[in-house]
Image (tube, rainbow, N blue to C red):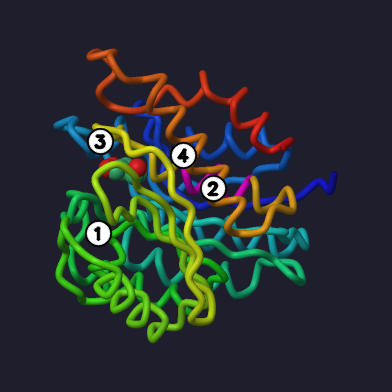
Amino acid sequence: MAYKKVLTIQDISCVGQCSLTVALPILSACGHETCILPSAVLSTHTGGFSGFTFRDLTDDMPAIVEHWKKEKISFDAIYTGYLGSIKQVGIVKDILNTMGKEKCVKVVDPAFADHGKLYSIFDMDYVNAMKTLCPCCDILVPNLSEACFLSGVEYKEDYDEQYILQILIRLSALGCKTILMTGISFNKEKTGILLYDNGKIQRYEHEKMPKGAHGTGDIYASAFVGALLRGKKPLKAGSIAADFTVQCIKNTQGDKKHWYGAKFETALPTLMQLLDK
Ligand code: PXL
């Protein structure tokens, strides 16, 4: 198996099982060297905790990247998630454009909204800045809320295929080459992922969980990148990531004290099995 070097850029939420505390172990478990560039350090994530601390690391980034350039460090894949500021989006754009090896796989998870609402620190200026990353990545991995904010289509919970197609066409117009949407459901029983590539749509349906868990977008995107770098095709990598995420939610359900994240660690053996299939 090829040994890949991946850079992931997202925050460190010290407590809360999201962003880097999820991406690093999942990508490592998939067998990849995982380098990190923290976008911010927070005491906890922002979804349900109050009074969290937030240290924006935007100003540290240029010197870190300069050092890497001097050391001739480059990456087989770059995967970005929750970022700390609008200024940082510009720095990340430069990283996507300059720090990849030839054939570097670039995955952008917009990571700024859920359930039709922006996460607490973000506003429409941030959404507009994120649009500028769309042409710089190979695969955009938005949930429905992020896809709506980026495309300017109103968020709905009840929708049909035409509605999703309209979103995909508008996202493509922003310069997205391939789009992998998660949590797309056209009926009550099932949900699934949808891969849009050059006007072609492929889908994978899976079990719909009655209740999600915080951080599952990061779990999904990390497992997707991990599987992709193991040589899986995008739809297969997406289906592995989806099945793993469902298992993470199942392993967390029923534990009321664990409201802030998913116990993804307990499902890593499932991920290993899915990768070997
Ligand atoms: O899981 C996305 C995420 C990442 N990082 C921080 C967050 C959130 C979602 O709320 O608050 C800090």
Comparing marks 2 and 1, which lies closer to the viewer?
Answer: 2
Q: Which of the two discs, 3 and 1, labels the residue nearer the N terminus?
A: 3
Q: Regarding mark 1 in the picture, which secondary structure is present there?
A: helix
Comes first in the chain, label 4 or label 2: 4
Q: Which residue is mark 3?
A: 53
Foreground mark, 3 or 2, reads: 2
Q: Is residue 206 magenta?
A: no
Where disc 3 sits, the SS reads loop
The residue depicted at 22 percent of the width and 37 percent of the height is: 47
Q: Position of residue 17 (x, y in %)?
A: 40, 30
Of the pair 212 and 201, the residue shown nearer to us? 201
Query: Magenta residues, as a range?
Result: 219-226
Q: Position of residue 181 (x, y in %)?
A: 40, 60
Image quarter for ligand 1: top left
Judged from the image, the secondary structure of the residue bearing numbered disc 4 is: helix
Alpha-carbon distance for marks 4 and 3? 23 Å
Q: Residue at x 66, y 51 (%)?
A: 6
Q: Earlier in the sequence, mark 1 or mark 4?
A: 1
| Residue that mark 1 sits on | 145
Q: Earlier in the sequence, mark 4 or mark 3?
A: 3
Q: Image check: 171 left or right of 25?
A: left
Residue 227: % across, % down: 65, 47
| Amino acid at pointer 3 | Thr
